[in-house]
């Protein structure tokens, strides 16, 4: 959902699913929905066009929604391949709401303390400018002012700029490195960060289970996801999965190749040996991912908090206390010589 999207458009499919499940007349339901929109927006014009097409009765609901751009081609193919329209629209909604990105979880334990470290080194640079001016003036009163003030040896521009540069580099590396691997190279991320694999698995196995429950075969579901899965880095995985299904080979191979956690690959191996249905397997797997994610993410956040906040506190306390001592010493020196 885009932050700037029309809220009425964002909730149209949710509204439609609710009305269809209640057995309401679709055209009348959309007409009532359009009456809630007071402004003549582009969305309302498209909606009125869809209602007119329904009145003509020449096309199915999903075809009309696709024609008026309420469903893109991928979403339309999901609905068309489902056993009924309601299940198809529910699948579309599950895709729209899927978001396994963990950046929000990283803000407080990682990026806030890194921001404090960056600010501390920037503040040190600003203070060094003031200190340099003070020392230049005070040397006229006493050439040994530096010894009197007790300026720490690390209070240099080289160290201050190095600290600022390194902290900015680490913050950027963590942010952009995560964003890139999470979207484009998840196999790399899964190797060092199993919690991400469980986070992705919560949505991936739910979507697969929804597609299988909607009557789409595992092979066809994998082919569809290989073209339009919301995370581009996992599309080649679904392509590999489709090829394995087509060749009647073991599926756990694809999961091992992409570094999914052992608990997932072991479950898939066991299910293939016992010939459990794909629908039951995917249901069991998203439940496993839910449990493992909830356990792991709490532990990971605590680890991040301890490490990054500890470093931030050390850097801030050391530099901050030395700055305070220097401010007091400078004030004392000025008082003595004036």
Image (cartoon, rainbow, N blue to C red):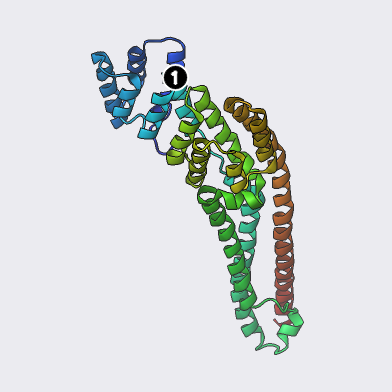
* Residue 131 appears left or right of 208: right
**Dot 1 crowding, Cα within 10 Å, few <14, some 14–19, many 20+:** some
Task: Indicate the quadrant containing the N terminus: top left, top right, bottom left or bottom right.
Answer: top left
Residue 135 picture location, percent across and down: 65, 82
Task: Indicate the quadrant containing the C terminus: top left, top right, bottom left or bottom right.
Answer: bottom right
Residue drawn where x is 63% and y is 40% of the image: 198
Residue 168 picture location, percent across and down: 58, 63
Q: Quadrant of residue 270?
A: top right
Nearer the observer, 199 or 49: 199
Nearer the observer, 26 or 148: 26
- From the image, tell me which residue sits under label 1: 83
Q: In this view, does 161 lie above or below 75?
A: below
Q: Is residue 78 above or below residue 114?
A: above
Q: Quadrant of residue 197?
A: top right
Residue drawn where x is 56% and y is 56% of the image: 177
Q: In this view, does 20 lie above or below 266?
A: above
Q: In which quarter of the image is residue 228?
A: top left
């Amino acid at each position: 959902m885009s932050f700037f999207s029309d809220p009425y458009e964002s909730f149209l499919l949710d509204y439609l699913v609710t009305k269809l499940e209640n057995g309401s007349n679709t055209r009348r339901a959309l007409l009532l929905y359009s009456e809630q929109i007071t402004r003549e927006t582009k969305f309302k014009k498209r909606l009125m066009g869809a209602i007119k097409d329904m009145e003509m009765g020449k096309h199915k609901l999903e075809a009309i929604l696709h024609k008026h751009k309420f469903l893109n081609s991928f979403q339309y193919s999901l609905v068309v391949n489902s056993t009924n329209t309601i299940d198809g629209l529910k699948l579309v909604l599950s895709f729209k709401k899927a978001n396994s990105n963990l950046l929000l979880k990283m803000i407080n334990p990682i990026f806030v303390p890194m921001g404090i470290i960056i600010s501390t080194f920037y503040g040190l640079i600003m203070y060094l400018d003031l200190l340099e001016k003070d020392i230049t003036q005070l040397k006229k009163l006493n050439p040994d002012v530096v010894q009197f003030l007790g300026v720490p040896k690390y209070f240099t521009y080289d160290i201050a700029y190095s600290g600022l540069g390194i902290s900015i580099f680490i913050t950027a590396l963590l942010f952009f490195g995560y964003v890139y691997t999470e979207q484009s190279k998840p196999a790399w991320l899964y190797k060092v960060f199993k919690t991400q694999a469980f986070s992705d698995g919560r949505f991936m196995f739910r979507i697969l289970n929804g597609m299988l429950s909607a009557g789409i075969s595992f092979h066809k579901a994998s082919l569809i996801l290989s073209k339009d899965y919301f995370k581009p880095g996992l599309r080649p995985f679904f392509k590999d999965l489709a090829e394995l299904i087509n060749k009647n080979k073991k599926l756990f191979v694809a999961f091992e190749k992409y570094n999914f956690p052992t608990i997932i690959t072991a479950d898939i191996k066991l299910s293939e040996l016992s010939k459990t249905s794909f629908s039951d397997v995917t249901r069991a797997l998203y439940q496993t991912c839910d449990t493992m994610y909830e356990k792991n993410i709490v532990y990971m956040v605590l680890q991040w908090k301890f490490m990054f906040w500890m470093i931030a506190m050390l850097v801030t306390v050391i530099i901050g206390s030395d700055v305070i001592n220097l401010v007091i010493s400078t004030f004392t020196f000025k008082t003595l010589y004036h």
